Image (spheres, rainbow, N blue to C red):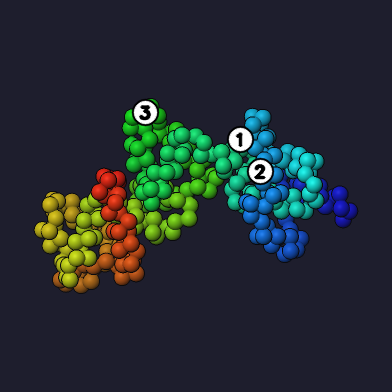
Amino acid sequence: MPLMKKIIKREENIVNNKIIYKNSDLQNSTDLLTLEDENVQKVISIAQQIIRENKPMKIKILYNRSIKQLDINSNELFNIIQYLINKKILIDGSKHTRKTILLNDNRRKLYNIILKNKGASFNFLRKEIFSSTQGSGGHLIWHLQMLIKFNYVKKLKIGNYTVFLPINMDLELGKLYFFMNNEINNKIIITIINQDKIRKPDVHKLLEEPRSTINYRINCLIEYDILKVKDTSTKEIHINPKLYEKVLRIIKDNKKLLNDGQKSKN
């Protein structure tokens, strides 16, 4: 196939976010790129210029401008654009880049709350963002979708709750943080850890909470495999051994949050 036809074909692929590499060398070349590379920064600058013109950042437009303005061959340019797409730095058709997405005050506040709390439920975020200002659930959903779209956060479904986690957080760890950011769950788990042996019906006796509340919470923790029934005949319970070290780490991390009153009421 003539070179020009190859370039046109690859341009068609990149417009659809589907660069098709003919060999492993081209595929692997994106792995060698970093955001600090000079040409990568130049392509990002051109993308930002397109957005400042109040235009959607279309990949085809970006390619055409970059190939004209930069001293760079088409293969290298395709690799750079593919790298930026893979990293969610750029998204075809968006008026934002990954850098500009946090310039919005509400999105930046949302992201910081999710980071600080190691994840947060939708209801908790709505209280934190719109407790003193006007806003709707629809606005919150839109901002969260933008954070997901640009790879800042991801979501996890736990029962009836939707939990938003930092993008690099392990899902199992995110589940543990969700349950243990609740004050009552945290008390239950710490109480069980501090006892050599404890029966499920006896936990509420050590806590200043109604028996029905404690039993409900314990059943939830068992359902999600955080607690285990060690002996069905005695109803003795303990922390899931596979999660024990992670639980200890979260208890340590949560001390400051609990002292500051930063607890999620699930």
Secondary structure beneath label 1: loop
Near mark 3 (Cα within 10 A), the count class, few <14, some 14-19 or many ≥20, is: few
Name the N-terminal-most of marks 1 and 3: 1
Establish if 98 lies above or below 215.
above
Mark 2–mark 3 Cα distance, whole angstroms, equals 34 Å
Report whether 131 appears left or right of 104: left
Numbered disc 3: secondary structure: loop
Q: Return the disc, 2 or 3, that comes first in the chain's sequence.
A: 2
Residue matched to label 1:
95
- Residue appearing at x 76%, y 39% in the figure: 65
Please state which amino acid type lies under the numbered disc 1. Answer: Lys
Q: Which residue is mark 2?
A: 44
Across and down, in percent, residue 175 comes to: 36, 56
Could you tell me residue 240's position as x and y percent? 30, 67
- From the viewer's perspective, is the residue at label 2 or at label 3 nearer? 2
Residue type at mark 3?
Answer: Thr
